[in-house]
Image (cartoon, grey):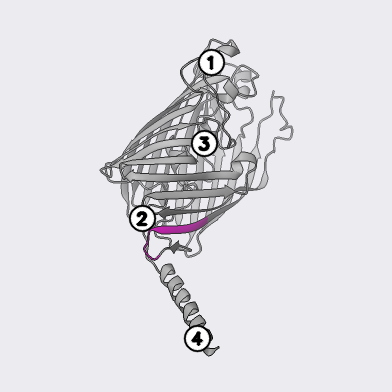
Amino acid sequence: MKQFLLIGACLISSFYLQAQENTRTTVDDTYLENDVVSLAGKKGFTFSSRAGDFLFKPYALVQASARFNRYEDVGLDTPYADKIANSGFEIPNAIIGFTGKAYNIVTFNLSVNAAKSGGALLQQAWFDVAVKESFRIRVGKFKTPYTHAYLTTLGETLFPVLPYSLTQGVVLPYSLNAVNPSFATGFDLGVQIHGLVKDKWNYQVGIFNGTGIDVNTANKTMSDDHDWLPSLLYTGRLAYMPKGVMPSTQGNPDNLNDDKMLFAVSGSYNVEAQSESSNDLRAGVEFAWIKNRFYFAAEGYYMNMKFTKRQMISKAYNFWGAYAQAGYFITDKLQGALRYDFMDRNGTDMGGTLNMPAIGMNYYFFGSNLKLQAMYQYMGRSGHETQYDRDDDGLGMPIHMATVMLQYTF
């Protein structure tokens, strides 16, 4: 009996020491992409095999916000009769997920956003096969390769709210509820070929469903307007980084000595998008620069929207948007932020643009992974021919918007 107890104690000790050794394994996190939180240099809860051929790392992001929106209801049939609406407290994101690698060839990521519902509950689910650094294949649900603002890690944006020119739907002279697309394409299901060449060139070419983050099923068909083309989203992006790989952050107090720069062009064609009502062609240009405590970015985007033949509307509509934003670390913990956002929401055939200046600040609590963000944005309108056009262009968008958000990550 004593012999069995001794053998059992030795086995338990062996398993314990093995676990301790695995936990202590030093790994390089810089490759662990998840588009939610930066894991570079953050060991946290990391589990790896003894040989280092398998690694598993959980992560989480929780954001809690207080928001104030004041609308203008003059001449509009809107629910904002008291001018104050969509205000109060909210949880923009409550994400938990895991990322990792297998056999130094496959990286993987899965995340669930408890703050969303329906198909958007599954935020990401993908794996990436590295044939070599310059040729990788990604399959699943992930960010489409379009715009610097969306490709920035979610928890490391300069402002708690993305530019409205990117996220708000356009205005059309038709009451088609399925239309009104935005410039952003966001998360989607598909396959992408991408790679990094000489640490300076990054390319991404992908095919996606074109239905966005809310749909996790295959529900597309062939195009009626283009008999040979499936009704999918075709997209690509090419980035040049003359000073090495640009980090996907808009400010990180842990690294105030970077000097990186990015130039990029991107485009996409969403065949029979918006419930098969239109073909949407998008194009964008990007510039971003991080220099020590300073961050600057500017980008512009264009969309040509043409109704499908079945809609019996021959006219095409063209829209554009752009923004410029800058941040500076006043202290090691406090970052100031400015942004100017433009949007030709009602199309180039009609006069008038939206002008949305914003000011903000970010405060980082060292040693706790807490980040406090605050911003104020004003929406101005100029160049409209009539008061009705002016009111219609800002429909559903607040004149004054203020947000305070506290974020925790690990």
Q: Which of marks 4 and 2 is nearer the N terminus?
A: 4
Q: Distance between the residues labelled 3 and 2?
A: 33 Å
Disc 3: which residue: 188
Disc 2: which residue: 256
Q: Which of marks 4 and 2 is in front?
A: 4
Question: Toward the viewer: 198 or 229?
Answer: 229
Q: Distance between the residues labelled 4 and 1?
A: 75 Å
Q: Percent from the top left, x then y, of residue 333?
A: 45, 58
Disc 1: which residue: 224
Residue type at the position of mark 1: Asp
Pointers 4 and 2 in contact (CB under 8 A)? no
Disc 4: which residue: 6
Pointers 3 and 4 in contact (CB under 8 A)? no
The span shown in magenta is 50-59
Up-down relation of residue 103 to residue 160 (above or below): below
Element type where label 2 sits in the image: loop
Residue 57 magenta-highlighted: yes
Q: Left or right: 104 with respect to 272?
A: left
Q: Left or right: 280 with respect to 173?
A: left
Q: Earlier in the sequence, mark 2 or mark 1?
A: 1
| Residue at x 63%, y 44% (from the top left corner) | 116
Residue type at the position of mark 2: Leu
Q: Which of marks 4 and 1 is nearer the N terminus?
A: 4
Q: Distance between the residues labelled 3 and 4?
A: 56 Å
| Residue at x 49%, y 40% (from the top left corner) | 140
Residue 102 magenta-highlighted: no
Q: Which of marks 2 and 1 is in front?
A: 1
Q: Nearer the viewer, mark 3 or mark 2?
A: 3
Element type where label 4 sits in the image: helix
Question: Toward the viewer: 247 or 125?
Answer: 125
Query: Picture quarter containing residue 216?
Result: top right
Up-down relation of residue 276 to residue 397 (above or below): above
